[in-house]
Amino acid sequence: GEEMNATFGVVINVARRPWHYLWNMCLVFFFLALSSGLAFRAPLHHVSHRAGVSVVALLGTVGYKGAIQGLLPRRPYMTLLDKYVACAILLQGCSITWHLVATGAFCSTVSDNDGDWQDGAYTGAYPARAPPALECHPRAA
């Protein structure tokens, strides 16, 4: 007999289109990292506000990374997007560290002088209002 051989040809056209990842992931991480940097726009004596903004931006970055984790293929190595996210988190960590250092350098604990915050015996930097527990202002040279 005669033998019949069947052949089957498949042509797959593959093209890399990274715009989905750039618009939906990289751009979001960029703005989250930028928002942490914008915390420096707050006045120097609002160091606690600066740190709060940076921590919220870091939490947003970590939360968004967790949300998109299932959308990305698993690889045994770090992709460019993984490195980008790691740099964003590192940048935000450095920002928070800087705010903590600035808090230690420019802030001092407010003493009430007599233990009663309501009596008005307060000699801090802001005598016209109720005293905060922590004052942050540039120290005089």
Image: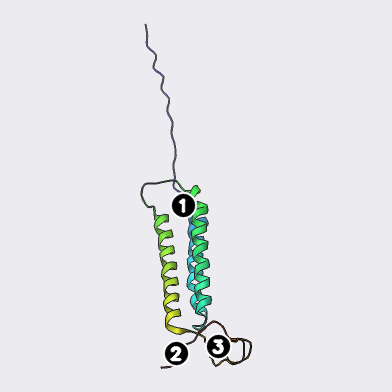
The reply to whether the C-beta atoms of the residues labelled 1 and 3 are less than 8 Å apart is no
Q: From this view, report whether residue 68 is shown above or below residue 131.
A: above
Query: Would residue 19 be visible to someone looking at this image?
Result: no
Point 63% across, 87% down: residue: 118
Q: From this view, report whether residue 32 is shown above or below residue 125.
A: above
Give residue 139's mark.
2
| Crowding near the residue tagged with mark 2, few <14, some 14–19, many ≥20 C-alpha atoms within 10 Å | few
Reading the image, the residue beneath label 3 is: 112
Distance from the alpha carbon under mark 2 to that under mark 3: 20 Å
Q: Nearer the viewer, mark 1 or mark 3?
A: 3
- In the image, residue 108 lies at what x, y percent? 47, 84
| Crowding near the residue tagged with mark 1, few <14, some 14–19, many ≥20 C-alpha atoms within 10 Å | few
Query: Would residue 7 be visible to someone looking at this image?
Result: yes
**Reading the chain from its start, which is encountered first: label 2 or label 1?**
1
Q: What is the quadrant of the C terminus in the image?
A: bottom left
- In the image, residue 1 lies at what x, y percent? 37, 6
Distance from the alpha carbon under mark 2 to that under mark 1: 50 Å
Point 62% across, 88% down: residue: 129
Distance from the alpha carbon under mark 1 to that under mark 3: 59 Å
Q: Quadrant of residue 91?
A: bottom left
Does dot 2 land on a helix, a strand or a loop? loop
Q: From this view, report whether residue 10 is shown above or below residue 130.
A: above
Amino acid marked by disc 3: Asp
Reading the image, the residue beneath label 1 is: 18
> Horizontally, is 114 left or right of 91 in the view?
right
Q: Nearer the viewer, mark 2 or mark 3?
A: 3
- Foreground pick, 99 / 117: 117
